[in-house]
Amino acid sequence: LGVTRYVQSKGDQSPPIGRNGLGDALSTATSHNCANPSTHPPSLTMPSSSSSGAPPNGVGSSTPSGLLPNGATTNNNNGGPDAVTVTQNSAQLVLPTPLFSQMSLQPKLARVFRKGLLKAASTTGAWIITSGCDTGVVRHVAAALEGAGSAQRNKIVCIGIAPWGLLKKREEFIGQDKTVPYYPTSSKGRFTGLNNRHSYFLLVDNGTVGRYGAEVILRKRLEMYISQKQKIFGGTRSVPVVCVVLEGGSCTIRSVLDYVTNVPRVPVVVCDGSGRAADLFAFAHQNVTEDGLLPDDVRRQVLALVETTFGCSEAAAHRLLHELIVCAQHKNLLTIFRLGEKGEHDVDHAILTALLKGQNLSAADQLALALAWNRVDIARSDVFAMGHASRLTSCTPFGRKNVS
């Protein structure tokens, strides 16, 4: 197993935050109850080189996963670009078409999610970024990949960005050009192991021990940098990014708030019924009024749910409630997936249509992307259903007859 550990560069004179110097925002990321492993969301991440110097044989392969050299450093102001440079050069990976960024199940919903995630990733050639730790929703991602054939797994890049101080036996990773036998262990207690269904790992060290949060800022910067690194449609559009929320804790609420309010905006797919933060998002989304507020009785109900769900103080609950409401106000960026709802498509359909919706693409570009994914069903239901047929006939070579 090979990894890259990100620490603060010795020549960096800016005020250090732990040892990776990722800036003041790190204190925000670590102050929102990130200690519980089940609250931490999986998200899309970055590559590393295999022990042989060649690309890995795929997720879950019996041969060593691709590794990045230990001891790599990143400048505290440019964590995203530096990490991309190291990982691209080490792993020789092609940047993805879209990015799926996920967070933290009834058995049926778990099966539907696994099937949908695998189908969406296989369809688009996406990278999947997670926390890399063998807990919570990461296990559902791993189970989805286990259900794929070897040829299908080889096409999917799954990257884990994990907090260094949370890992068991982390000292074994210290070294350069070193191959480490690493076996899954029980995740009980403060520390956890890495999930072995990932292609690459990036380990982020900010000096904290036994807690989540160190990786949040680097992961977000990587996602934003990758999404802008590669252009599609002749260099006019960025790589699309989508966030998928399953369960999740208070950290998830802050992450979603950043996704829907920062520029560029990132669409979010919420799986209602998966619990905790996801269910709160779905409830707020359903009840927010046209003026962006919750009725008083609903507001009191949600506030009580926040307090009991996250076990937080009244002041923290009010802050989280405010963040939930702001997220719910961005209805055009939130897609709520409800299992079994009449007319509801599969998870992969929700993910891919959210990508189209969040990119502010022209009708022609939406059609081109749907056809590049070989998803005629999405072209029918989400492009032509919006009344763009006549414009598409005149501005694209495809015409409606190709997808009718």
Image (spheres, rainbow, N blue to C red):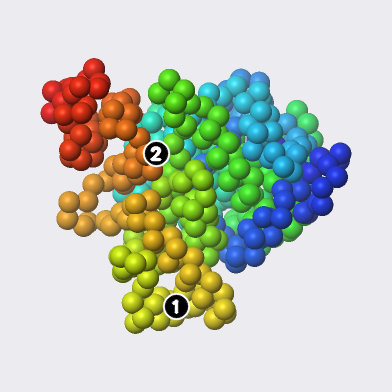
- Give residue 274's position: percent from left, percent from top: 38, 61
- Give residue 217's position: percent from left, percent from top: 63, 49
**Up/down of 315 relative to 146, above or below:** below
Image position of 374 (left or right of 224): left
Where disc 2 sits, the SS reads: loop
Image position of 206 (left or right of 352): right
- Give residue 80's position: percent from left, percent from top: 64, 38
Q: Which mark is residue 359?
A: 2
Query: 343 or 109: which is nearer to us?
Result: 343
Whether residue 108 appears in this view of the structure is no
Q: Are marks 2 and 1 in contact (CB under 8 Å)?
A: no
**The N terminus appears in which quarter of the rendering?**
top right
Label 2, residues with CA under 10 Å away: few <14, some 14-19, many ≥20: many
The part of the image, by quadrant, that contains residue 270 is: bottom left
- Give residue 171's position: percent from left, percent from top: 77, 46
The part of the image, by quadrant, that contains residue 348 is: top left
Label 1, residues with CA under 10 Å away: few <14, some 14-19, many ≥20: some
The part of the image, by quadrant, that contains residue 367 is: top left
The residues tagged by marks 2 and 1 sit, at their Cα atoms, a distance apart of 33 Å
Query: 176 or 34: which is nearer to us?
Result: 34
Q: Amino acid at mark 1?
A: Leu
**The C terminus appears in which quarter of the rendering?**
top left
**Up/down of 375 relative to 92, above or below:** below
Q: Amino acid at mark 2?
A: Gln
**Up/down of 248 relative to 198, above or below:** below
Whether residue 86 appears in this view of the structure is yes
Residue drawn at (62%, 26%), measured in percent from left and top?
88
Residue drawn at (47%, 71%), measured in percent from left and top?
321
Q: Nearer the viewer, mark 2 or mark 1?
A: 2
Q: Which mark is residue 303?
A: 1
Where disc 1 sits, the SS reads: helix
